[in-house]
Image (cartoon, grey):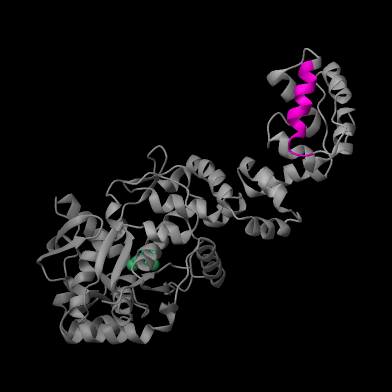
């Protein structure tokens, strides 16, 4: 079987972490089976769909390491949806209805008040030609519903296992609006059939849709793809992601300086039985991918994990990549500089801090002027190399009472302006003798 998956965003907003996770899981599953990926733009909502959202979604997907072989858009396939509707009508599975939203909501209220489930009463199904003509004369246009067969629909979900729905408990879904625009329920199935989609992986908010769509696939003569419904993301304390982390879109995380591999490593592992860890690149994530490890429990997205993992991702970063990325922010680094500082970065843009320490100006902190005076006295005569720090400290502690941590920290503060940072044995040769001596005499340099 040819493995073919699709990711189907609606371009009505920016890509949110929840959707990014769905996209990533589709992509990793697809590529772990050498499959083909389709990006389907679900843009039938003309008012809310915007080209700028489509552009930013595509950019964010690429940033996350997700690529696709083909793109399609629903707005270019309206004829296909109309043809499918006609077919459903011809076989007695689509029918016209005229209720307004207000009428439907009144019906639902009445059903609930009399203790019945708010399932559509199929009034449209009993309309005869005269009724249709009467409505049309009144200027009322029909919307269309798909007639469900009242049976049990079951499937083995790739994530949730056995799923069964009694279709009697569902309303016949609306599949076409009054104005001729298709509803997602129909359009998605028509597309999935035409593109020979083999597996559908999406959020568990689509489980009920899936039950109805299984009947639609069959009514339209298509093969039902394998289905997998991922649990939704929640924030670290179990609250819905939409509350506290609701504004979390990929663009913002990128702006905040997180590496895309950090985010994809996290999104590929939350909600699975595997531990969370930083991966080196997307290929490694693909090799490691296993959908059967995803559980039905809510997946916790803890932004603290991002901070911890980002440090690791930077340690994995090759010099070449770091160089090209840092050139973009005006830092022309060499390999020695990268080797010295990379272990101290939580985010790549923090390289600027150590750039200033090595090549720019800092405000030295002299917290013990006697100690610093002695340190200047014993400063190495020779050119600085990686052994200079060790021998310098040794001669200070051998000839004075200053030693250990207090000595190291005072020197570090004077030379770098910070209490912490990369190994001084590596920093000293990079900073150079003149700057070090000038800083130790308290000068901003
Ligand atoms: N556009 C739909 C959504 O974003 C696609 C759902 C699906 O994958 O079928 O919810």
Q: At which x and y percent is residue 287?
A: 38, 60
Relative to 269, is 191 above or below? below
Q: Residue furthest top?
A: 401
Q: Quadrant of ligand 1?
A: bottom left
Relative to 185, is 163 above or below? above
Residue 141 in view: no
Q: Residue furthest left?
A: 151
Q: At which x and y percent is residue 47?
A: 48, 71
User: Which picture quadrant has residue 365?
Assistant: top right
Residue at left offset 9%, top offset 66%: 151
Relative to 56, is 414 above or below? above
Which of 167 and 145 lies nearest the eye of the viewer? Answer: 167
* The N terminus - image quarter: bottom left
Residue 388 drawn in magenta: yes
Residue at left offset 63%, top offset 59%: 321
User: Which picture quadrant has residue 122?
Assistant: bottom left
Q: Is residue 114 left or right of residue 1?
A: left
Residue 99 drawn in magenta: no
Which of 205 and 414 lies nearest the eye of the viewer? Answer: 414
Q: At which x and y percent is residue 113?
A: 18, 50
Residue at left offset 55%, top offset 70%: 55
What is the magenta range?
A: 385-398
């Amino acid at each position: 079987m040819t493995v073919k998956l699709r990711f189907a965003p609606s371009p009505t907003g920016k890509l949110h972490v929840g959707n990014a996770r769905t996209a990533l899981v589709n992509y990793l599953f697809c590529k772990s089976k050498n499959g083909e990926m389709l990006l389907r733009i679900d843009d039938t909502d003309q008012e809310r769909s915007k080209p700028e959202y489509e552009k930013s979604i595509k950019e964010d997907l690429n940033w996350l390491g997700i690529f696709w072989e083909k793109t399609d858009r629903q707005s270019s396939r309206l004829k296909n949806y109309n043809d499918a509707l006609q077919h459903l009508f011809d076989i007695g599975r689509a029918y016209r209805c005229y209720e307004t939203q207000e009428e439907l909501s009144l019906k639902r209220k009445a059903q609930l008040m009399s203790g019945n489930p708010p399932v559509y009463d199929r009034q449209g199904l009993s309309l005869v030609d005269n009724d249709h003509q009467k409505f049309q004369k009144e200027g009322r246009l029909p919307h269309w519903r798909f007639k469900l067969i009242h049976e049990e629909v079951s499937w083995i979900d790739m994530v949730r296992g056995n799923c069964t729905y009694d279709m009697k408990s569902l309303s016949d879904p609306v599949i076409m609006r009054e104005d001729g625009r298709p509803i997602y329920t129909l359009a998605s199935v028509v597309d999935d059939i035409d593109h020979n989609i083999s597996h559908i992986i999406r959020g568990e908010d689509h489980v009920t849709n899936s039950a109805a769509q299984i009947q639609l696939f069959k009514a339209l003569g298509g093969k039902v793809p394998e289905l997998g419904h991922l649990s939704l993301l929640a924030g670290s304390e179990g609250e819905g992601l939409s509350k506290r982390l609701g504004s979390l879109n990929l663009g913002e995380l990128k702006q905040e300086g997180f590496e895309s591999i950090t985010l994809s490593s996290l999104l590929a592992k939350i909600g699975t039985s595997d531990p969370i860890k930083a991966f080196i690149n997307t290929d490694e994530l693909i090799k490691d991918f296993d959908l059967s490890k995803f559980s039905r429990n809510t997946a916790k997205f803890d932004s603290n994990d991002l901070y911890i993992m980002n440090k690791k991702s930077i340690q994995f970063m090759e010099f070449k990549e770091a160089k090209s990325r840092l050139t973009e922010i005006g830092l022309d680094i060499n390999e020695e500089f990268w080797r010295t500082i990379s272990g101290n970065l939580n985010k790549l843009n923090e390289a600027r801090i150590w750039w200033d320490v090595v090549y720019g100006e800092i405000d030295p902190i002299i917290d013990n002027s006697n100690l610093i005076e002695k340190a200047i006295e014993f400063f190495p005569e020779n050119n600085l190399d990686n052994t200079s720090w060790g021998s310098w400290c040794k001669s200070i502690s051998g000839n004075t009472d200053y030693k250990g941590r207090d000595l190291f920290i005072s020197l570090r503060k004077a030379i770098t302006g910070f209490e912490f940072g990369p190994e001084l044995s590596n920093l000293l040769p990079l900073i150079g003798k003149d700057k070090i001596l000038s800083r130790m005499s308290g000068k901003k340099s």
